[in-house]
Structures are given as C-alpha cells and as structure tokens.
Amino acid sequence: MKFDKLCKIIFLKNKYVNSSEANIHILSHSLHFASSVFEGVRVYNMIPFYLNEHINRLENSCKILDLELPFSKKKISKICYEIIKKNKIKDGYLRPIIFRGTESMSPESINCSTILSISGWNWKKLYGHNNVSLLVSKWRKPSPEISPVAAKSSGSYQISTLAKNFALRKGFDDALMLDVNENVCESSSCNIFWIKNKKVYTPTTISALDGITRKIVIKILKSIKIKLEIGDFKLEHIYKADEVFLTGTASEIVNVEKINKKKYRDFQCTELIKSKFEKLKSGL
Ligand code: PMP
C-alpha cells in the first residue's frame, strides 16, 4: 500500500495541493536531522476524535523541539476539517506534521522555516486483527535526560522502527519496549495496560508517550470504578497478569494475546473497557 495513493488533497505550506504534488526538497532539515513533530488523529463518521487534545500535544511537541507553530491552533483545526471534507474521510486518520525547511544543513536550525502539512485518508485500525503478539525488544526507551520523550517527534521513532521490524521478522505483531531501568514502557506506537485480580496497571509516562487514548482509558476506568496503579513495573509483573491490552490512536484498544512465550487468554475486563470506548467513538 502506498499512502500517497490513499490521499487526494493534502495541505502543504499554505495551500491545498494534489497528493502527487505534495513534495518537499531533498535538503529539508528535517529529513537529515529528524527535526519534525507530528500527530495521528482518528476520524469517526467524518468527525476528528479528540482533535483539540492532539493539537495541544502538537503545540507542546513544537515547544519541546524549539519549533514555532506555523499557524494558530484554530487554523490548524480548520485545516483538519477541510482535509476530511476534501478527501471524503468517513472513518480514517489525519497526519499533521510540522517540519523544517532548507535553510540549514547542520544540526542548528535557528534560522530554519517551519512548515505545516496535513494529510488524511480513509483507514481501518492499525492491526488487522483483534489479538496481537509482542516481542520484548533489546531497544530501550530513553529517559527524558537523554531524549525529549514527551514530544511526539520523528526522532523518537528511530528505535521504534528497529524494534518493530525485528519483532515482525520474528513473526510477532509488535515490540514491547522497556525503559533504561528495565521497567515495562510501551510498544513501538502504543501505551500498555494490564490487569491482575481486577486491578489495572500501567507504566508512568516518564519514558513513554503521554497517549491520548491512554488518558481516555484512565477516565473510563474511573467511571466504572476499576482501580488503577501507575508506576514502575518489571516484566515479571506483566507476566503474572490476567489480561494485557494496548492503547493508541491508530490501534484503538487491542488485546495482547502473547508476550514472548507467555500467553494471555482472558479478555473479559478489556472487552468491557473497549465497549465503553466504542460508545465514546459514536458520540454517546
Ligand atoms: N506511544 C507511542 C510511542 C506512540 O507512537 C503512540 C501513538 N501516538 C502512543 C503511545 C499512543 O498515543 P495516542 O493514544 O495519543 O495515539
């Protein structure tokens, strides 16, 4: 699948162009130095889901990476709605990205322009199936002293790509990554939760992305009075869990059926959380 073929109209710099014309120069700073930040936004029934939260995180990612937000948040929101309309996105995905122009060919980017692009396409969930398998990766998620992990930045995904490629080649669906202290952290593009004796556990967001779906799930747990503990947990803790699930914009909520050789067969509580999430999606 080629994603450029899935989109018809893309917003680039300050206008709407045909997908085939949405090109950038080879000397763009971001291509060489990963100086870009982006978002993934779900569209359900032509409405962007939690759009303000995504735009706020985009703004925060820009601040962390010393990028200027090239348009107001209101204007970015408007462009998202236009992209949905122009591409007739019923159930799909938006990809806003902010990146740097060609004004520097060394790491420094003080005089670089910042460019916004927003694409969108009709898209189903990330994994084509309900239950996924995870392989624990040798790649660790960096701590905030090493890398600006709070930003959803292109640079952060280098290790995610390596970890996921390795897992896929070994026949798993994704990688489970630990932090530098060997605590369970997140998958290549999702937050992780697990359940033991009706109590839910999830890692802190010190080294993991502060996921918007994670926040929604935490709210759901409160509303159905299920206890939650956020903390540092080693792999042994998750191996003793009854249920495990991932959360993310692209994947939504997905059951984990296997981590390395450990299998999970119970998804009862996860299914309840999923049903609440489905209600939110349909605006109920
Ligand atoms: N962690 C990583 C590394 C991610 O890329 C994502 C996807 N944005 C998530 C977690 C989940 O975040 P969200 O629920 O905001 O999509």
Image: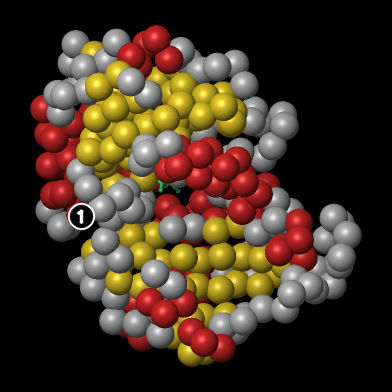
Name the residue rendered at 50%, 44% in the picture.
165
Relative to 9, is 61 above or below?
Answer: above
Q: Is residue 196 left or right of residue 8?
A: left
Residue 176 sits in which quadrant?
top left
User: Residue 52, how many percent across, how many down?
Assistant: 41, 58
Residue 179: give x, y in percent of width and height. 56, 24
Asked if 188 appears above or below 26 in the picture, the reply is above
Image point (75%, 71%), residue name: 28
Pick the residue in front: 81 or 186.
186
Whether residue 186 appears in this view of the structure is yes
Q: Quadrant of the N terminus?
A: bottom left
Q: How far across and down, in percent of the image, does residue 274 sit? A: 17, 40
Outermost residue toward the front in this view: 170
| Residue at point 72%, 32% (across, down) | 146
Residue 199 in sight in this render: no
Residue topped by disc 1: 281
Q: Quadrant of the rendered structure where residue 51 is?
A: bottom left
Type of amino acid at the residue the image marks with label 1? Lys
Instruction: Estimate the x, y position of residue 77 in percent, counting from the top left.
Output: 44, 70
